[in-house]
Image (cartoon, rainbow, N blue to C red):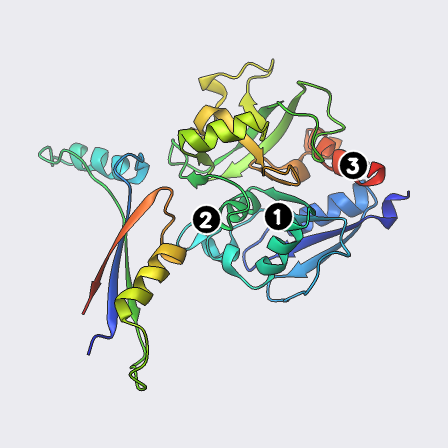
Amino acid sequence: MAKKAFIKVMLKEEVLDPQGKAVLSVLKSSGFGNVKDVRVGKYIELDFNEDKSGKRRPLEEEAEEISEKVLSNPLIEEFSIEIK
Amino acid sequence: MDNKKIKAGITVFPGSNCDADVYRVLKSVFGVNASFIWHKDEIEDLKKYDFIVIPGGFSYGDYLRSGALAARSPVMESVKDYAAKGGIMLGICNGFQILLEAGLLDGVMLANRSLKFECKDVYLKTLNTETPFTCAVKKGAVLKMPIAHHDGNYFATESLISGLVRKKSVIFKYCDEKGGITAGSNPNGSIRNIAGISNETGNVMGLMPHPERSSEKILGSEDGGWIFKSIIKYIKEK
């Protein structure tokens, strides 16, 4: 029974990620010259109540709505969901 | 009409920290009847207020995204309703971010280009003086106000920007002392130097700099006072 949703929120490719750029510059100055680019995102875990009634809509659907309406801002971010 | 008869509501979220400053300026400097609105209050109707200010701060610790959690708190339903009915609403700094997250204004705030918290005086060019927030400002005036933010890098897609420009909704741009809109006078990387915008109907404005911190001579600038003078003038003439 799936009860957890693991959500990754990342800035869209075309949006500048200043945090990633700062990490990149630190990596370079720390001797990790092989790294070409860095993007920093968010990782969110949702722990759901058990579906006792068996009538709830699929978790995928609920996690999708939560990600779209609250966890990400569709103007600049995109998300992916993994249910386990 | 006496300023005392004008009622202003100031929303307060956990982490708001400019609420008392706004209150002081409205009450002590302009003599407006100001009061606080706690975020958990599901006030059915905000219509007793002549205008609403959503002050700056770090509502909900800026968790998730600046303004994201405050934008989804109970009081915002009434706030959205108030805006939809044409109520005058000013969001300052974090208040601007909340209005963006609530979908009352177009666009989004990214981290400053410098990745630093920028706290300094900036100059603003007034692009539209026919709004409730700028009707007392001289056309094209340059105003000095402080900024204090980490996420003030305004961003919107080209189509949103051209919509804003077409509707004259870009109210303030960062500029130099003489009013030149230059790359050097842009403190945070905002697209096209945008510092303040309104909604399509013009009754809601978001502004990144702090007019409440620049409404008294002792604070180094009185220019921010023009925003509040405009709102008061607009309400009196309405």
Q: What is the residue that sits farthest to the right in this orientation?
A: B1
In which quarter of the view is residue B25 placed?
top right
- Viewer-nearest residue: A33 or A40: A40
The residue marked by circle 1 belongs to what chain?
Answer: B
Q: Which residue is painted at 43% across and 34% down in the image?
A: B156
Task: Measuring from the top left, give residue A14's x and y in whole percent.
Answer: 28, 34
| Residue B234 image label | 3
The residue marked by circle 3 belongs to what chain?
Answer: B
**Residue behind mark 1:** B55
Q: Is the Cβ of the residue at disc 3 closer than 8 Å to that at disc 1?
A: no
Q: CA distance from mark 1 to mark 2?
A: 13 Å
Disc 2 crowd, CA 10 A, few/some/many (<14, 14-19, 20+): many
Q: Amino acid at mark 1?
A: Pro
Q: Which residue is painted at 14% across and 33% down in the image?
A: A36
**Quadrant location of the C terminus of chain B in the rendered image:** top right
Task: Measuring from the top left, give residue B98's x and y in whole percent.
Answer: 52, 49
Callout count: 3
Is B1 rendered above or below residue A57?
A: above
Task: Measuring from the top left, give residue B67's x and y in whole percent.
Answer: 49, 51
Q: Which residue is painted at 26% across and 35% down in the image?
A: A21
**Residue behind mark 2:** B66
| Residue B98 image label | none
Q: Amino acid at mark 2?
A: Ser
Q: Earlier in the sequence, mark 1 or mark 2?
A: 1
**Quadrant location of the N terminus of chain B in the rendered image:** top right
Q: Quick check: do tags 1 and 2 share a chain? A: yes
